[in-house]
Image (spheres, rainbow, N blue to C red):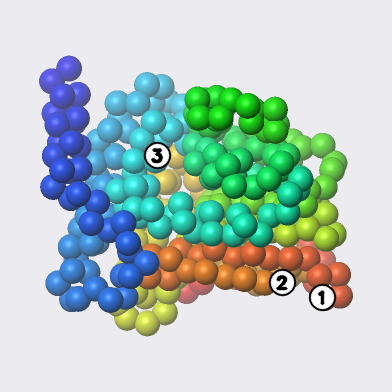
Amino acid sequence: MGGWRISNSFFILVLITVNLPITEWNELLLLTATEIPAAIGTSLIGLISTMILVEKVPGKGTSGFDRLSKVYDLLVLLVFGRALQRAQTSFINKIKPGARVLVVGGGTGLFLEALLRKAQSVQITYVELSKRMLEKSRNRIERSMPEMLNRVTWVHGTVHDLPETTYDLICTHCFLDLFEGEELIQEIAALRMQMHPAGAWYFSDFNYVSGWPMSWISQSMIWGMYRFFRWTCGIRAGQLSDFPRLLKSVGLVMKDRRTYYGGMLESVWYEFLPHVDCFPVDELHDPIFP
């Protein structure tokens, strides 16, 4: 019990002293040389604090993101402020009323809640491999908007468990970065098969930024996040792949793009254009950024 009180006290102390100074990291390029190390230090404190707490999550032996379900939203808030949420909701106004939407790897349901609030009469299939994340998402909607539950089909599994059907919109927020190599190619191909010919793909994820100091900051932070999630969740990927090229290879064209957190987070709206040349799936390769 003593260790648990110490962990809680330390985490509360971090929240008070840090006071979330990085909620507007989309302005990171304007930071001075002294502010940059402080911002990075804040992120490291958030990661270390979560490492302390994750040991206390019941069911430590569970796999995947189950272990992080109780502290995931707080971790995101500490490290990225509201930037990640803004990236994941920036194009909701593009979603057509009544669209059939596939959300893959939706996490704790923050995006799902925003989607149900802002997109009119959409029908959503919500796919999540983590049972605890799925339960948290469902509980969130039950508490905040129970009248919307009938608009969501809950799937505990992966996209490979879905029946053969098509969707007007595919949403992958910080999902493709869990894969690389052949596994990533298979995930993209499976999702592309679920996409209606006139549909769209709403993608948001991390991004390596060029130009100092953001090139160093983005590479360091993404390297640290991959090590953290490999340790806590057992993901196999170790670095970001060239997502724009891979999505273009299956016939998707970038129609709109916004960046946040100094360019380290990107939100992209893709559409399928039949006249665009695309490679057969078995000829794709996964080029990794240096």
Q: Which residue is mark 2?
A: 253
- Marks 1 and 2, the one that precedes in the sequence: 2
Q: Which residue is mark 3?
A: 72
Left or right: 87 in relation to 103: left
Q: Which mark is residue 8?
A: none
- Between 44 and 184, the one lying in front of the other is 44
* Number of numbered labels in the structure image: 3
Left or right: 32 in relation to 167: left
Left or right: 186 in relation to 45: right
Q: Measure the C-alpha gap from mark 1 to mark 2.
A: 8 Å
For mark 1, give the secondary structure.
loop
Of all residues, the one furthest to the bottom in this rendering is 211
- Between 183 and 11, the one lying in front of the other is 11
Residue at image position (39%, 40%) is 73
Q: Measure the C-alpha gap from mark 2 to mark 3.
A: 32 Å
- In terms of image quadrants, where is residue 264? bottom left
- Marks 3 and 1, the one that precedes in the sequence: 3
Q: Amino acid at mark 3?
A: Tyr
Res. 162 in view: yes
Q: Amino acid at mark 2?
A: Val
- Between 29 and 186, the one lying in front of the other is 29
Question: Which quadrant does the N terminus fall into?
Answer: top left
Res. 106 in view: no
Residue at image position (46%, 27%) is 62
Residue at image position (74%, 36%) is 161
Q: Do the residues bearing badges 2 and 3 touch, measured as CB atoms within 8 Å?
A: no
Q: Which residue is mark 1?
A: 276
For mark 2, give the secondary structure.
strand
